[in-house]
Image (spheres, rainbow, N blue to C red):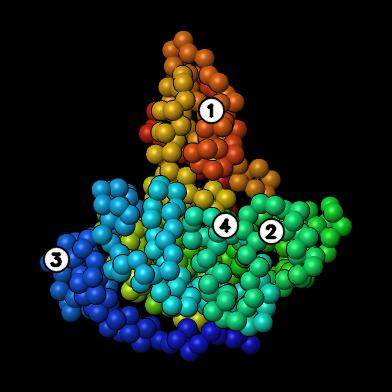
Amino acid sequence: MTEYFDTSETRSEAEREADLFKKLGAQIAHAKAKSPAWGKRLADVDPAAITSRAALATIPVLRKAELMAAQSENPPFGGFVAAVPGEFGRVFMSPGPVWEPQGAGADPFNGRRALFAAGFRRGDIVMNAFSYHMTPGGFILDEAAIAMGCTVFPAGVGNTEQQVEAVSQLKPVGYIGTPDFLKILLDKAVETGRDATSIRRALVSGGALFPALRQEYADRGIAVLQAYATADLGVIAYESEAREGLIVNEDTIVEIVRPGTDDPVAPGEVGEVVVTTFNATYPLIRFGTGDLSAVLPGASPCGRSNMRIKGWMGRADQRTKVKGMFVDPAQVARIVRESAGIARARLVVERDGDQDALRLLVEPQAGAGLDIAAIGEKLRDVTKLRGAVEAVAAGSLPNDGKVIADERKYD
């Protein structure tokens, strides 16, 4: 029998919509009053008039590039934060750079429902292998796990042998992190003769959970479910034991719009995920994630009644997530700019076994030689990720404007 975090997960669509749009007017009024950027952006919006999805769709989508430009002009937050230092506990810097404040209160990133659906319960010892360095990655589910009564080991990334040693002694029942790193830990435990069999459930994000990898975990006795989260918005949607799409989080409005526009697509059509949340510290209204997805018809077989989306289906732009980190075309441009002899470059994202891999293809300038090792170091310095660098013939890269090519297969 399915357990639910609370009764709101099974309420009717009409009840949920009425509740969301009753609260939305107050959120818009709060954003206008407390945030200079929202006050200007929503100057002509009457909060009391935004009572439906059709009304919400009249507000322009705020996309990452626009937010980054505003933050660059008016650092650190571009005027989009409705609080001042001292009213929020942490500030993060994600790749871009993009600055994000942490909201107030327990579970500020709304992760508890995702953990509960994945089987986490009060008293569990949980290993969190997301990064705690600069970005909110590690804190998103750390805060949620603590709020629901779990004890968290903040493992972070890297130091694989030490992490395996910690697992063998601490014996966590749960894992939080990227899909790939759990396999690295388990394989290292086998290699070193350490006991990692305490791990029985996992909630993963920051990368694709391929069917073969999920089955390998199941064969090892580990039930693995997924969450869809971003640094700006927290947990947007999550998987349940039904494993049929991702269920939109409560107190979250998700729309699917035609990429590059403000217009919602027809039901079932693939488009950009646009999200509105009720974070009082960092109100984001019609925020474009840049991710592609589509709405699944009907409710989940698990009994949760909120909207479902198919999951991550690529990027509406070329900004791409690799091993839990976003790589931006601007970073590729910086590599070209700061490396001698490169005329053009394309960053290829692919799979190498069970892990994401990068290849930077570089065309030389006329008569120039390329220092492949130095370019590789620059790739690592700029993206914080390792990758191979390959020199290709001048003029061989396609003339299609693509700087980042995501060639991973998700079927």
The tag on residue 375 is 1
Tell me if I can see residue 209 in this picture: no
Q: Identify the mark nearer the N-term, 4 or 2.
A: 4
Q: Quadrant of residue 51?
A: bottom left
Structural crowding at the residue carrying mark 4, measured as other residues with C-alpha within 10 Å and reported as few (<14), some (14–19) or many (≥20): many
Mark 1 or 2: in front is: 1
Seen at 30% across and 84% down, the residue is 18
Q: Quadrant of residue 196?
A: bottom right
Position of 194 relative to 158 (above/below):
below
Structural crowding at the residue carrying mark 1, measured as other residues with C-alpha within 10 Å and reported as few (<14), some (14–19) or many (≥20): many
**Label 4, label 3: how far apart the Cα atoms are:** 38 Å
Tell me whether circle 3 and circle 1 mark residues in contact (CB < 8 Å): no
Mark 4 or 2: in front is: 4
Question: Which residue in the structure is indicated by mark 3?
Answer: 43
Rendering coords of residue 218 (x, y %): 73, 66
Tell me if I can see residue 15 in this picture: yes
Rendering coords of residue 354 (x, y %): 67, 49
**Label 2, label 3: how far apart the Cα atoms are:** 47 Å
Seen at 59% across and 70% down, the residue is 243
The tag on residue 182 is 2
- Identify the image quadrant of the C terminus: bottom right
Q: Identify the mark nearer the N-term, 3 or 1.
A: 3
Residue sitting nearer the eye, 91 or 238: 91
Seen in the image, is 38 located left or right of residue 155? left
Tell me whether circle 4 and circle 2 mark residues in contact (CB < 8 Å): no
Q: Quadrant of residue 276?
A: bottom left
Question: Which residue in the structure is indicated by mark 4?
Answer: 131
- Residue found at the very far top of the displayed protein: 367
- Identify the image quadrant of the N terminus: bottom right
